[in-house]
Image (spheres, coloured by chain):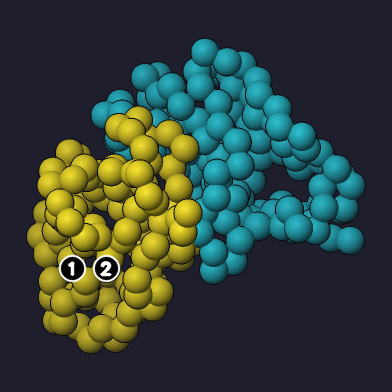
Chain colours: A yellow, B cyan
Amino acid sequence: NAGVMQNPRHLVRRRGQEARLRCSPMKGHSHVYWYRQLPEEGLKFMVYLQKENIIDESGMPKERFSAEFPKEGPSILRIQQVVRGDSAAYFCASSPDSRNEKLFFGSGTQLSVL
Amino acid sequence: GENVEQHPSTLSVQEGDSAVIKCTYSDSASNYFPWYKQELGKRPQLIIDIRSNVGEKKDQRIAVTLNKTAKHFSLHITETQPEDSAVYFCAASSNSGYALNFGKGTSLLVTP
């Protein structure tokens, strides 16, 4: 079991560009969560998705951020027109059911906006 | 929203000593409390968790206690080793049931 796979590990973007972060959950897991971690901070919930459905996006900024988890392929967190404040580590986690227990985290994508 | 406070922010102990990290939460509906360990540049890893119907849980050198009335829970690490050095995060489930609300972390340093 390869665990939760995220790519890229590091992503550098200039202000105004788009960032696309990918997450493949653990085998057998169909529930995906995205969290953001700022330096010296804890993880902040962004969005919870099941296959083809956004269940809870209460932590997502209202603009520029979107997420999807298609029937086939990885979950994608998309940030349009990035700004310096978007620089953070973005972690994906998966679980086998809708309870948010026993979350398995990926290694994260470190986004740096120049 | 749900607020999880974690103390201390840094903790330094000698190898073999015990370490205690404390968290408080505000939402009385929270019923699940995990602890994660994150080494530098690595993923957060679940080390122990407790549900609200249990007051204490132990797994070898680590234990967690929960006081629902006071809305606080603690992580206890006994016989600390240098490899225990990491950032530890507590979390509490939210009233929506989907989000985990994390504390800001405790940087634990175990010196030989």
| Amino acid, disc 2 | Leu
- Quadrant location, the C terminus of chain A: bottom left
Q: Is residue A40 above or below residue B84?
A: below
Residue A113's disc number = none
Q: Position of residue B18 (x, y in %)?
A: 82, 41
Q: Residue at x 30, y 32 (%)?
A: A98
| Amino acid, disc 1 | Ile
The residue singled out by tag 1 in the image is A79
How many marks the image carries: the answer is: 2
Q: Where is residue B13 in the image (x, y as percent from the top left)?
A: 81, 52
Tell whether B90 sits left or right of B108: left
Q: Which residue is drawn at 21% across and 74% down?
A: A19
> Which comes before the other along the chain, label 2 or label 1?
2
Which dot, 2 or 1, sits closer to the camera?
2
The residue singled out by tag 2 in the image is A21
Q: Distance between the residues labelled 2 and 1?
A: 8 Å
Callout 2 touching callout 1 (CB < 8 Å): yes
Along the line of sight, the residue nearer the viewer: B1 or B39: B39
User: Which quadrant of the figure has residue B66?
Assistant: top right
Asked whether residue B94 appears in the rendered view, the answer is no
Q: Do labels 2 and 1 share a chain?
A: yes
Q: Position of residue B74 (x, y in %)?
A: 63, 31
Q: Which residue is drawn at 73% across and 53% down?
A: B84
Neighbours of disc 2 within 10 Å: few (<14), some (14-19), many (20+): many
Q: In this view, does B61 lie above or below B51?
A: below
Chain containing mark 2: A
